[in-house]
Image: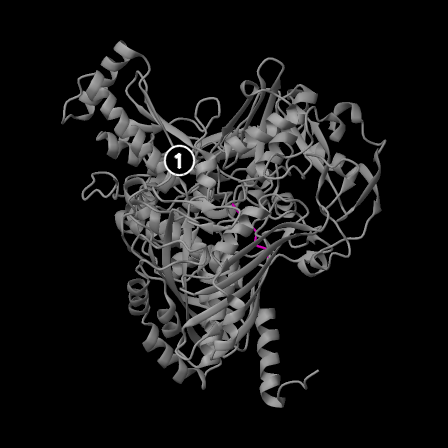
Amino acid sequence: MNEKVSERWPAIRFTVNGEIREVKTPPMKRLLDVLREELHLTGTKEGCGEGECGSCSVRMNGELVNSCLVPVLQAEGAEVQTVEGLATNGVLHPIQEAFLKCGGAQCGICTPGMLMATAQLLERNPHPEMAEIREGLAGNLCRCTGFMRIFESVVQAATEKPAAESEEVQHAR
Amino acid sequence: MSTHATTRIVGSSVPRKEGIDKLLGRACYVDDMEREGMWYGATVRSTIPRGMIRSISYDRRIDWSEFTIVTAADVPGENHIHLIIADQPCLADGKVNHCEEPIVLLAHADRHKLREAVKAVKIEYDPLPVVLSIEESEKQETIVWGADNLIKSFLLEKGDVDAAWANAAHIVEGEYRTGAQEHLYIENNGIIAEYDAERGVTVWGSLQCPYYVFKSLRSVFDLPEAKVRVIQTETGGAFGGKEDYPSTLACHAALLAKKSGRVVKMVYDRMEDLAATTKRHPSRVRHRTAVDGEGKLLAMDIDLATDGGAYATLSSTVLSRATLHSTGPYLCPNVRVHSRAWATNMVPYGAFRGFGAPQAIFAMERHMDEVAAAIGIDPVELRRRNFLHDGDMTATEQVMREPVILDRLLERALDESGYHAKRQKFASENAASAVKRGMGLAAFYHGSGFTGSGEVVLNSLAGVDVTPDGLVRVLVSNTEFGQGTNTILTQVAAEALAIDYTRVTMAPADTGQVPNSGPTVASRTSMVVGRLIERASLQLVGMLRADAGLGESYDTEEFFAACERYRAAKGAVLSTCRYEPPPGIVWDDKRYHGEAYPAFAWAIYVAQVAVDTVTYSAEVEGFWAVQEVGRVLHPVMAAGQIEGGVAQGIGYAVYEKVVWQDGRMVNNQMTNYIMPTAADVPPIYVYFEQIPFRYGAYGAKGIGELPHDGPAPAIVNAIRDATGVGFRHIPLLPEDLFAGLTVHELVESIGEPAQR
């Protein structure tokens, strides 16, 4: 999109990882493409483009969403968190630590979405049962791990990170 | 020899080398790369399975002057993808042989305009008769490939099968079928290409085998080695699906780059990736087996056929591995395996984890349960009586020189899964329950590394060097796509060099910087390439001791200080090694006889399954995977490999069905091609017995493919145990279970249909 054309579009403002961002772009453009192409946050991945694989999962106003199904106009005024917003000054978030330690990431392409789904799950339910972990991650496909090490990573993250601290970290952004 | 009693780094679960980049979301996959002024590419594909191209026309409503258009006429060199046989065009030239065959390539600065443009290219055909199944191909009435449709055949013979039937107490026959399976890596295929008159072709992409792509680019562009460069980007899963296909896509992107004068990115969307790229070969395997009164195998006569699709791709080597895994881990004096890969007008099939072995092992291990039932022996006992042991000979008369511990693996699998107690319990509960439970198992091996003389032919070269800023680099063309190449090879180097793991790194997987250490396939990376890195590292220590005063014992800093003394005195600090086969490994390609693999990984897998006779779903409730893969180099990653492979195998058995219509995949979406999710996978319990292999890196054998071999037969055997119905085909989705179980009930109630 060149400058002249983009001037035609109304500005859409939203918060990404704690920073206010403004884009001038077609309002039906997918949030996924806006994040990747305009804000250069390429941590969020596209796997299927139809909301099945969860690779493009981000958090928007406290909900886990498939950013490939969200027109950017829906993000107007929203608070969006992507994988780039998990670590603080390069220090891994406890969820990221747990995935690293437990082998929760193999090829890494589902990992950003899986991390966001885990963050969402643990914020809602700091000490989930296995059935709740399975349900919480059921919208995020991983073809490498068979999910066992991902479950272990979530359990590990829940053990390492008391609920209060988790919320503090989230709100600090 | 690598039978090290103690190691510091090997055997421990060090952090994944590129793990932090992946967790921070900053690992750079091909679609994450942007280049100034980059254009996008798209493909116009065949809509019919076979025919002559009568005309190609371009709808006048599109301003084609904005686009770059490439056809077969633009190929500067040979118009074929360099693999085993030169039969597959880079772009169709006058004729198409399968649906989705690439015909025209388009490039434009705006990728949104490409979608419309692809639809505006009209191709007219004169259709030709088509062949869409093994059965149609083997009739040889319509010839669609070569002189006879036969891509490859093997005949493996041991003893005298024909003489064995007369002495048999029982003869059991069965036919088994497996369907196509999609890799479903979460990152689709993608390539970025650049062309420059001086530097030639450079491509970046999601791929397994940089030197395969390199070879195809050289022949398609008719360029010398110095003018082709292939760089792997972070790769989001592959499983064999990025072994051969990236060669085609790289040539396409590079052709567009050359003609447009732009950097061109081609990244498939999911629908295109599913419809157009390779899948696992469908198979049909017929077994005829003679056993004596004690249940000992007397003869196996096996007829194995695969559907290769429209072009040869890797079908011959897939068929070879299928053939060599078709007789199972059993001792049998008389064996005949006749195997054939048939050409059809299906989208070409290709490499997928296991590479023919899962198909062959499904048939063998399902058949063992049918043999057991026919002769009235427990399926566990039948297997036990026929296992290979140390010193025994396989079907190719390879003597088992390394320990074979199938009995130990079996005992452990039975114990850990509670197999016998559960079978009894389920048998008593099933009658009164709509949910029928059962236990099933599979015994199998997987040959590590290339088949037969393959590794000698590959002649891999690998090494290590040391940078002036104090890092060791592992120099290999083997790639990381999740399975752990980066971590395992740097672990091996750090161990052998006796330095810190953090000071060892991977050189970029860039043909401009690393030697050809062979493809990243065939469960060869840890065992074969790891061994080269171990040797090159030990050789480097020797060089530093001889020429740079490195002491008997040293720390990491002293090591790097010695490297700098070496550099000052002799130049680059570099050590490389070439593959040497273990002694006594001799394979006769003509007779298809001898040492098929330098080593085998062994396994017993057990599945617990619940079949709901109301919904006709089969749920795997628990899975136990017991294996011997030599030394385990990284326990967390090794378990991760097994769990991931088991989950794919569960998908192969009861979830994943490719639906075809006239040679085209019609469920080419994640919405309707279903893989197991976090909610579906059972607990997967993984156990390793470790017997270090003398000629693998620190005792390692192959691991990556093994776990895909066993789940399907174990699960379908468990369904047989649960329901009494021995299904002979996969995948088994609810509609398939419904059909099989209701037919069975009908037969039970009204008797067998009259003999025809």
Q: Which residue does the numbered mark 1 point to in the structure image?
A: B24
Position in image of residue B452 (x %, y %): 46, 45
Residue B675 is situated, as x and y percent measured from the top left of the image, at 52, 56
Q: Quadrant of residue B623?
A: bottom left
- Residue B128 in sight from this viewpoint: yes
Q: Nearer the viewer, residue A102 or B498?
A: B498
Residue B181 covered by magenta stretch: yes
Q: Position of residue B544 (x, y in %)?
A: 23, 20
Q: Is residue A87 visible?
A: no
> In which quadrant will I find the C terminus of chain A?
top left
**What secondary structure is found at the residue carrying circle 1?**
helix
Let me know if residue B422 is in the magenta part: no
Q: Chain of mark 1?
A: B
Identify the residue at horizontal 39%, vertical 63% (top origin).
Answer: B605
**Front-lying residue, A45 or B447:** B447
Q: Residue sitting at 55 percent across and 52 percent down?
A: B319
Judge by depth and name the residue closer to the eye, B374 or B238.
Answer: B374
Relative height, residue A121 to residue B259 (above, below): below
The boundaries of the magenta stretch are B180-185
